[in-house]
Amino acid sequence: MSFQDRLFIIAGEVGFTDDTQLGDIWSSADAGKSWEMLSQAPGFSARSGHGVVAIGSSLVLIAGWPELSDIYSSTDGAKWKKAAGTAWNCGNSGVRNDSCGKFDFWPVVHDQQLFLLGGSGSRSTFGKLYDETWALPLAAQFDVASIVV
């Protein structure tokens, strides 16, 4: 992710199980020649398959594996604040939700809208694939903390 003239690596995985998910955040100011850990525990759970987009002056992290629907924002990449809403109108954000949460979807900001495209929602690879598109219009004075997709 590119944000405020820096590269960011936000969470991820070293395997496809609960205990191999990562939650750390790294940043580079020199095009990836060197990296600095910004946070080992940023306040959201370890995850992979999540989405990250830049909206205005904030990074927005959306959902991820395993079947999460929570949303967080950050203005610096180190400190994260949980949004009031959830993605895909799911309840109980931050916990696994097999009937609603997703991972491996594509978040895209285009034409002043945030789109969430497709994704998976099953612990088995290719177990449950979504072919839907969700869109959220982004107002000029958009408040990231109140995001609900």
Image (cartoon, grey):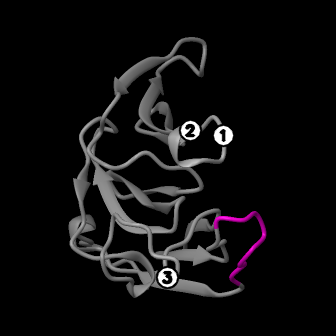
Identify which residue, 130 or 57, lies in the foreground.
130
Residue underneath mark 2: 20
Q: Give amino acid for label 1.
A: Gly
Give the farthest residue toward the top: 34
Q: Are marks 1 and 2 in contact (CB under 8 Å)?
A: yes
Residue underneath mark 1: 15
Question: In the displayed structure, would residue 41 be above or below residue 140?
Answer: above
Question: In the displayed structure, would residue 113 be above or below residue 2?
Answer: below
Identify which residue, 134 or 126, lies in the foreground.
126
Residue underneath mark 3: 100
Q: Give amino acid for label 3.
A: Cys
Q: N-terminal of the two: label 1 or label 3?
A: 1
Instruction: Tell me the element at label 3.
Output: loop
Question: In the displayed structure, would residue 12 be above or below residue 117?
Answer: above
Q: How far apart are the alpha carbons under marks 3 and 2?
A: 22 Å
Identify which residue, 23 or 3, lies in the foreground.
23
Q: N-terminal of the two: label 1 or label 2?
A: 1
Residue positioned 58% across, 64% down in the render: 103
**x and y, in percent, of residue 132 in the image:** 65, 87
Q: How far apart are the alpha carbons under marks 1 and 3?
A: 23 Å
Instruction: Tell me the element at label 2.
Output: helix
Tag nearer the camera, 3 or 2: 2
Badge 1, how many Cα within 10 Å: few under 14, some, many 20+?
Answer: few
**Residue 145 in view:** yes
**x and y, in percent, of residue 76 in the image:** 29, 38
**x and y, in percent, of residue 64 in the image:** 51, 60
The magenta span reads: 123-130
Question: In the displayed structure, would residue 109 be above or below residue 92?
Answer: above
**Residue 111 in view:** no
Q: Give amino acid for label 2.
A: Thr
Q: Mark on residue 127?
A: none
Left or right placement of residue 23 versus residue 109 in this view = left
